Amino acid sequence: MALTIGDLGKATNTKVETVRYYERIGLLPKPSRSTGNYRTYGAAELGRLSFIRRARDLGFSLDQVRALLGLSDDRTCDCAGIDRIANEHLREVDRKLADLTALRRELKAVIDSCDGGTVAECRIIEALGPAALPNA
């Protein structure tokens, strides 16, 4: 199987620029070159890029992806390191969910405080503005 960079990008829903970036930062190995000096990729690169994309879709940072790839390259390695990275990421997701829940609650309270009327009486605008405006 020989894929061009465009084929690889299409197969993994990854922009060509992103594939090149992953190569530059070492997440993907430098590709082989065709006789016409075009990048060529095989099943291994396709699998690796698919892994990277899925990890990124799940919100893992590039550093975490790099660490996961490093651990996954040694198939005999204990998976405790992978568990640690995944649990660390889960804690971060939980923290973000808690922040979003608090944000939603606050925004809902601001919206519920609005009784309609004019902009001059709008509780949403008032809640978004400075705490105390000098009277004109």
Image (spheres, grey):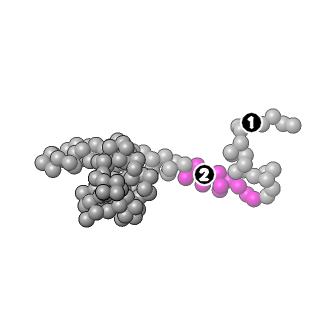
Q: What amino acid is at disc 1?
A: Ala
Please name the predominant secondary structure of the magenta segment in the image.
helix
Q: Residue at x 40, y 47 (%)?
A: 21
Quadrant where the image shows the N terminus: bottom left
Q: Residue at x 26, y 47 (%)?
A: 69
- Location of residue 46 in the rendering, given as x and y in whole percent from the top left corner: 29, 59
Magenta highlight range? 104-116
The answer to the question of whether label 1 and label 2 lie on touching residues, with beta carbons closer than 8 A, is no
Find the distance from the CA under tag 1 to the CA under tag 2. 20 Å
Q: Which residue is mark 2?
A: 107
Q: What amino acid is at disc 2?
A: Leu
**Nearer to me, 24 or 48:** 24
- Location of residue 51 in the rendering, given as x and y in whole percent from the top left corner: 30, 55
In the displayed structure, does residue 2 sit left or right of residue 80? right
Q: Secondary structure at mark 2?
A: helix
Q: Which residue is mark 1?
A: 132
Query: Disc 1 or 2, which lies upstream in sequence?
Result: 2
Q: Residue at x 75, y 52 (%)?
A: 122
Q: Residue at x 28, y 56 (%)?
A: 45
Q: Secondary structure at mark 1?
A: loop
Task: Report if residue 132 lies within the magenta region.
Answer: no
Badge 1 density bin: few <14, some 14–19, many ≥20, Cα 10 Å: few
**Nearer to me, 99 or 36:** 36
